[in-house]
């Protein structure tokens, strides 16, 4: 593959040459730098690059140009290269324009001129953006290929596992391609077992489990050490934060994740309220960065392994994993977050993974292009998904049981939905059933006020009707409330006394459960903040309590 392009545009020749010089100096090994002196010239260049099949990784454009502003150029250029990162070069006076561009064209960053010294004011920002681009770029690619049927839940499960672990793959749909059918009949021995995953080394896996896939890809699925100071259960924001802080402060740390690092946050198409990301950050980016950061400090992250139970053998804590292995350590942090509630409606379970999905199945963006989509639920996660799919689907219908959206959704999302013409909010409505021939086609809905039923055509339905804590592994070991949330700190005390079985000569720490040395952080904890930042805060704060605990064992 030829080198991806960094395209820079400026009408001031001096600035243009300076940008070109700095970009070449730092990025020339991996990227080709192309420059243009006006928006029109740059658009011509973009069209030619597209025709030649080149990849553009970044547009770095001056906002103030006489015929076409930087924002106007970007609006056109991203139609051809929607994945390219977008950066404006601005003066102080352009700050408002740049902030508006964040919302309008998904601007990734604005740089204030001058950017001296580039080593601190230019390169770190661009490196970060280029690493994002690289992680997401679907270039002509000789990696993993998944061949199957888009109607099959098993194919969806494999795609979902790869996508949520951010492993690039190419999807080959046997429905639309005779050569794929040919490929499959050879590989799966003619059997109807789909999908088949083809690896670059020439081997295949037929209908693999997540663990088989993870092992084949080279992801860690087994612990490497016999003993840990800290065992973290769950790789959402809380668990990842604890792994980063634990490992960075010298604790032998392992994190166990049943699916993919990122948790619920990892499925969010855009987190807009996390500190330090004015243009928002996708859950996938946040998860990738956090997992890389934890590993950099020496934490082990094992995936496709579920923690089934915790045992206490003082002073040790043992965690039993789904493959029967046991982890041993001094302290355990439970951060398993929440799982989605299931919607009870006729015909739904038969179509799971074939048009009906719990949560935002972002992998389905291409499948719903130009079609109608239903989102069930009225909270933020539903709103974010509606905004995401509005960019791909013909029309998005948000079904809410109540009379309006705003009760459970942040104001900014309610406003954004109101401004988006292809999103319709259908109030006082619940789902009664779903049907389709192998894939979702029709959803039956009921008016909650009148009881009247009607049918909606839809290619996909994404369900966000709330969540419950995923704490069954705590059964019989730590105290939970009646909804299953884990009790910590003062909540485990009764009449000013610690719970039965409490052996430490002190009261439980703030995030410590009813068993000394077992902590809980994030959404699964009774009274937690149920936000990314809150989970990160709790996960990080727990580490100092664990340090104090470790001094006593
Ligand atoms: C679609 C969506 C959008 C959201 N958007 C925002 C937003 O914009 N801003 C915001 O602040 N919040 C948002 N939230 C809420 C936010 O994501 C959560 O509050 C946060 O992720 C909670 O973090 P956590 O680490 O406690 O748990 P989770 O994120 O739920 O992560 C828990 C992890 O533990 C794993 N796990 C569970 N049980 C086990 C086990 N037994 N063994 C091994 N692993 C296990 C799970 O697979 C999961 O990866 C959103 C949530 C969703 C679903």
Image: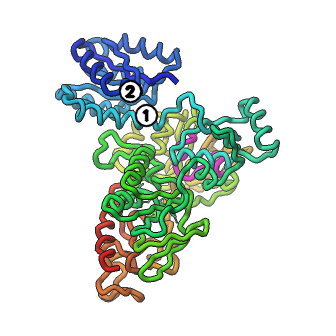
Q: Is residue 449 visible?
A: no
Left or right of 107? Residue 155 is right
Most distant residue in the right direction? 190
Give the image quadrant in which the ligand numbered 1 is located: bottom left
- Local packing at callout 2 (Cα closer than 10 Å; few below 14, some 14-19, many 20+) is many
Q: Which residue is mark 2?
A: 58
Q: Residue at x 73, y 35 (%)?
A: 175
- Local packing at callout 1 (Cα closer than 10 Å; few below 14, some 14-19, many 20+) is some
Tell me if residue 360 is in the magenta stretch.
yes
Q: Residue at x 47, y 24 (%)?
A: 55
User: Is the C-beta of the residue carrying label 2 under 8 Å from the nearest atom of ligand 1?
Assistant: no
Q: Residue at x 45, y 30 (%)?
A: 83
Question: Residue 281, how many percent across, how many down?
Answer: 38, 43
The quarter of the picture where residue 65 lies is top left
Magenta stretch? 352-364
Q: Secondary structure at mark 1?
A: helix
Q: Secondary structure at mark 2?
A: strand
Reply above or below: 431 against 388: below
Q: Residue at x 47, y 82 (%)?
A: 313
> What label does residue 425 carry, if any?
none
> What label does residue 133 carry, if any?
1
């Amino acid at each position: 593959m030829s080198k991806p392009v960094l395209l820079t545009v400026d009408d001031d020749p001096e600035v243009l040459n300076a940008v070109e010089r700095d970009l070449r100096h730092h990025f020339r090994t991996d990227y080709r730098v192309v420059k243009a002196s006006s928006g029109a010239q740059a658009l011509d260049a973009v069209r030619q690059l597209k025709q030649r099949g080149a990849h553009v990784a970044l547009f770095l454009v001056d906002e103030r140009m006489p015929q076409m502003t930087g924002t106007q150029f970007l609006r056109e250029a991203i139609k051809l290269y929607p994945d390219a990162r977008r950066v404006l070069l601005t003066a102080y006076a352009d700050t408002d324009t740049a902030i508006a561009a964040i919302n309008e064209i998904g601007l990734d960053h604005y740089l204030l001129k001058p950017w001296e010294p580039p080593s601190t004011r230019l390169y770190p920002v661009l490196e970060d953006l280029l690493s994002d681009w690289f992680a997401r770029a679907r270039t002509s690619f000789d990696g993993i290929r998944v061949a199957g049927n888009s109607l099959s839940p098993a194919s969806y499960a494999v795609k979902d596992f790869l996508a949520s672990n951010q492993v690039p793959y190419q999807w080959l749909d046997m429905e639309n391609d005779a050569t794929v059918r040919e490929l499959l009949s050879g590989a799966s021995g003619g059997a109807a077992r789909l999908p088949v995953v083809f690896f670059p080394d020439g081997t295949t896996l037929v209908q693999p489990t997540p663990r088989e896939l993870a092992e084949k890809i080279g992801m860690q699925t087994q612990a490497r050490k016999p003993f840990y100071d800290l065992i973290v259960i769950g790789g959402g924001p809380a668990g990842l934060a604890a792994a980063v802080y634990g490992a960075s402060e010298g604790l032998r740390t392992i994190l166990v994740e049943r699916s993919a690092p990122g948790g619920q946050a990892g499925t969010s198409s855009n987190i807009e309220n996390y500190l330090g990301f004015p243009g928002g950050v996708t859950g996938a980016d946040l998860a990738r960065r956090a997992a890389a950061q934890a590993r950099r400090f020496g934490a082990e992250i094992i995936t496709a392994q579920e923690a089934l139970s915790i045992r206490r053998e003082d002073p040790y804590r043992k965690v039993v994993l789904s493959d029967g292995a046991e982890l041993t350590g001094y302290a355990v942090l439970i951060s398993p977050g929440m799982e989605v509630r299931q919607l009870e409606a006729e015909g739904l379970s038969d179509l799971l993974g074939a048009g009906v999905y719990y949560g935002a199945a972002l992998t389905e963006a291409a499948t719903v292009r130009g079609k109608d989509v239903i989102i069930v639920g009225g909270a933020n996660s539903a709103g974010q998904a509606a905004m995401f799919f509005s960019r791909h689907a013909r029309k998005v219908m948000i079904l809410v049981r109540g009379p309006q959206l705003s009760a459970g959704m942040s104001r900014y999302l309610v406003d954004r939905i109101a401004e988006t013409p292809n999103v319709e909010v259908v109030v006082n409505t619940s789902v009664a059933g779903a049907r389709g021939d192998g894939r979702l086609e029709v959803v039956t809905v009921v008016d909650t006020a009148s009881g009247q039923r009607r049918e909606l055509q839809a290619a996909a339905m994404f369900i966000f009707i709330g969540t419950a804590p995923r704490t069954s592994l705590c059964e019989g070991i730590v105290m939970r409330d009646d909804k299953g949330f884990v009790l910590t700190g003062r909540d485990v005390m009764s009449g000013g006394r610690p719970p039965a079985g409490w052996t430490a000569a002190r009261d439980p720490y703030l995030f410590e459960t009813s068993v000394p040395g077992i902590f809980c952080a994030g959404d699964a904890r009774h009274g937690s903040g149920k936000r990314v930042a809150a989970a990160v805060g709790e996960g990080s704060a727990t580490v100092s309590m664990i340090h104090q605990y470790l001094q006593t064992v």
